[in-house]
Amino acid sequence: MPRVRKGAARAQARKRLLRKARGHFGSNSTSKYRAKMAVVRAGVYAHRDRRRIKRDYRKLWITRITAACRMRGTRYSLFTNGLRRAGILLNRKMLSEIAIHDPKLFDKIVAQATKAAKPVPAKQPRVKVG
């Protein structure tokens, strides 16, 4: 049986790889070896940043809610505790949108949450012994 040298398949694979590497700088888009490394690295960054975006948005929503709560004289932790105890099932994204676009509704939500929140005990003064 004759040996197959896979010329067409190899050329297709190279073409597919270089198509993925289009837009990369210098030999990263023309050399097969460099293009392969660049494509793998780009995949790693893409995978990491898909998760990072979710983190960043959650941080932004919490920051917005915190600012809105402080304007109404409460803290974020007390607000979320009150929401949970009052049975208000709104996620952070929706709460931040409400805080920005409908302040009157957010006022009502804060009122319900602060009413249902667990009361915070007063701090006891520290006493030095000895």
Image (cartoon, rainbow, N blue to C red):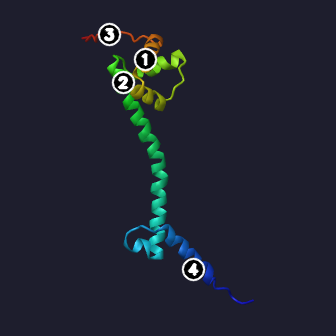
Q: Indicate the quadrant containing the C terminus: top left, top right, bottom left or bottom right.
A: top left
**Is residue 92 rendered to the left or right of residue 73?**
right
CB atoms at circles 3 and 1 under 8 Å apart? no
What separation in Å lies between label 2 and label 4 (alpha carbons)? Answer: 59 Å
Helix, strand or loop at label 1? It is: helix
Of the numbered discs 3 and 1, the one sitting upstream in the chain is 1
Q: Residue 72 is drawn in which quadrant?
A: top left
Please name the residue that numbered disc 3 is placed on.
124
What separation in Å lies between label 4 and label 1 (alpha carbons)? Answer: 64 Å
What separation in Å lies between label 3 and label 1 (alpha carbons)? Answer: 28 Å
Please name the residue that numbered disc 2 is placed on.
68
- Image coordinates of residue 116 in percent, x first then y, are 48, 12
Helix, strand or loop at label 2? It is: helix
Of the numbered discs 1 and 2, the one sitting upstream in the chain is 2
Relative height, residue 84 to residue 97 (above, below): above
CB atoms at circles 1 and 2 under 8 Å apart? yes
Relative height, residue 53 to residue 23 (above, below): above
State which mark lies toward you, 2 or 4: 2
Of the numbered discs 2 and 3, the one sitting upstream in the chain is 2
How packed is label 2: few (under 14 Cα within 10 Å), some, or many (20 or more)? Answer: many
Please name the residue that numbered disc 1 is placed on.
110
**Is residue 90 rendered to the left or right of residue 122?**
right
What amino acid does circle 1 point to?
Val
What separation in Å lies between label 1 and label 2 (alpha carbons)? Answer: 10 Å
Please name the residue that numbered disc 4 is placed on.
11
